[in-house]
Image (cartoon, helix red, strand yellow):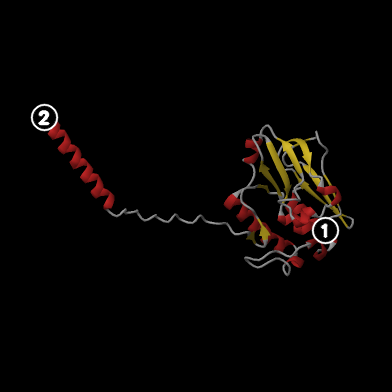
Amino acid sequence: MIALLVALTFGVAILIDHLLLRRQPLVIAAEVPKERPRIAPPFVAGFKVPDGLLYHPGHTWAAAEGPNRVRIGIDDFAAKLAGGVTRIEVPARGKWVRQGQTIIALHRDGRQLDLVSPIEGEVIDINPNIDHDPNATRTDPYGDGWLLTVSSPDAKTNFRNLLGGTLARRWMDDDAARLRALAPAMAGVTAQEGGEAVDDFVTQLPEAEWEKVAREFFLTA
């Protein structure tokens, strides 16, 4: 009988303690605000340099879409320099291309701008837009204006030779400064800091300067 009374008393004490705790206000710890991630500027010296891509010094880009699948295109610098192209030549499906090999030819007004591959591999897909709308490379070089997809068994090694992040932004800034120094006609059409470079540079350049710029920046000489 005594044991039963002890157990009953203990149970009542636990119940009272539980009810008292339920009446206490709930205190929620203040959430510590997370540091806002640094957002890279959308333009570098007037040219778009999106993060998430890797850039060849010859002004083409590569984007991994799988362990071996890589999409490639031209960057905003090349697109703005070439302007409104009328025809684009690229390798056929099944063609093996090497990193640094000339594989892209942009045509307009009797001029041709050659660019190199940023990656090595077999061409497995070609953007169908480039036949009926080659100007997409000018208006949206990182989106609808992409050019090729390749299967690259050694993509990781190839990527080490490309530029990304801060290095890519510094490189673009340096090339924009070199462009202004190399072609005096460009001084009035390149953008101020934070703005976008003027499109269709080719119309601003005499033939002699055009050839000099193409050799200097697109590494195809």
Q: Characterize the local packing of mark 2: few (<14), some (14-19) or many (20 or more) Cα atoms within 10 angstroms.
A: few
Residue 155 in view here: yes
Residue name at image x 83 percent, y 38 percent? 92
Spatial separation of the CA atoms under disc 1 and disc 2: 100 Å
Left or right: 88 as drawn, with respect to 164: right
What amino acid is at disc 2? Met
* Mark seen at residue 1: 2
What amino acid is at disc 1? Gly
Residue name at image x 83 percent, y 60 percent? 208
The correct choice, above or below, for 158 with respect to 164 in the image is above
Q: Position of residue 25 (x, y in %)?
A: 29, 55
For label 2, the SS is: loop
For label 1, the SS is: loop
Q: Position of residue 175 (x, y in %)?
A: 67, 57
Q: Which residue is mark 1?
A: 84
Left or right: 189 as drawn, with respect to 44: right
Q: Position of residue 211 (x, y in %)?
A: 81, 56
Q: Position of residue 146 (x, y in %)?
A: 75, 48
> Residue 117 or 33: which is nearer the viewer?
33
Precedes in sequence: disc 1 or disc 2: 2
Left or right: 163 as drawn, with respect to 112: left
Asked if disc 1 and disc 2 are in contact, CB closer than 8 Å, the reply is: no
Which image quadrant is residue 111 in? bottom right
